[in-house]
């Protein structure tokens, strides 16, 4: 019986050993599953991190593209505004140039008219001076002319007298 008891004890020990081995195997399987689960979780975390990094990279690229597009649009807007400002400046300068030319023509016409008026005034003053000079000359010459006319009349009278008297007193041959 002792053998039986020992045999039962051995079998019990073997059964316990098998049970311990089975528990150890299960523990190893559970640990293996836990390690695999941790690896899967680690891979999922790494995948999520990679996706997050890719999303951040895409977001940064999108923001850079939007920034570059905004800068390009701003440069285009500034160029258009600069061109419009230059066009308005050129138009303003052309208007000012045309106004200056018109004013210059008006000034030239006014100066020409003033010169014509001055020439007419000088001509009239010269004409008045000429008439005054002629009047003075006439006043100076009038007594001499009258005297000359008087002498001429006297000479004519004398000639007539001489002609009349010479024919009366001279006898024909």
Image (cartoon, rainbow, N blue to C red):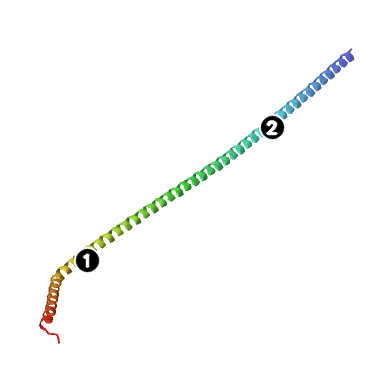
Q: Residue at x 60, y 39 (%)?
A: 65
Residue 55 percent across, percent down from the top left: 64, 34
In front: label 1 or label 2: 1
In front here: 34 or 65?
65
Question: Between disc 1 and disc 2, whose residue precedes?
Answer: 2
To which residue does mark 1 refer?
130
Give the CA distance from mark 1 to mark 2: 120 Å
Farthest front residue in view:
173
Residue 65 in the image: above or below residue 150: above
**Image location (x, y in percent) of residue 7:** 88, 16
Drawn side of residue 155 relative to residue 95, left or right: left
- SS under mark 1: helix
Q: Is residue 39 left or right of residue 99?
A: right
Query: Which residue is labeled 2 in the image?
Result: 47
Numbered label tally:
2
| Quadrant holding the N terminus | top right
Foreground: 6 or 126?
126
- Left or right: where 150 falls relative to 2: left
Report the quarter where the C terminus lies.
bottom left
**Residue 49 in the image: above or below residue 161:** above
| Picture quadrant where residue 161 is located | bottom left
């Amino acid at each position: 019986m002792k053998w039986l008891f020992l045999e039962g004890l051995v079998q019990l020990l073997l059964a316990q050993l098998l049970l311990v081995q089975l528990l150890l195997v299960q523990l190893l399987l559970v640990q293996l599953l836990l390690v695999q689960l941790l690896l899967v979780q680690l891979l999922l975390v790494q995948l999520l991190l990679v996706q997050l990094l890719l999303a951040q990279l895409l977001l940064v690229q999108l923001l850079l593209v939007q920034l570059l597009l905004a800068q390009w649009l701003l440069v285009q807007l500034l160029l258009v505004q600069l061109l419009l400002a230059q066009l308005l400046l050129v138009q303003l300068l052309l208007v000012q140039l045309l106004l200056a030319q018109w004013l210059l023509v008006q000034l030239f016409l006014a100066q020409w008219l003033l010169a014509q008026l001055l020439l007419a005034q000088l001509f009239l003053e010269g004409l008045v001076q000429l008439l005054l000079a002629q009047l003075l000359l006439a006043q100076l010459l009038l007594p001499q002319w009258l005297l000359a006319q008087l002498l001429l009349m006297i000479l004519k009278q004398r000639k007539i007298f001489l002609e009349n008297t010479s024919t009366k007193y001279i006898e024909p041959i």
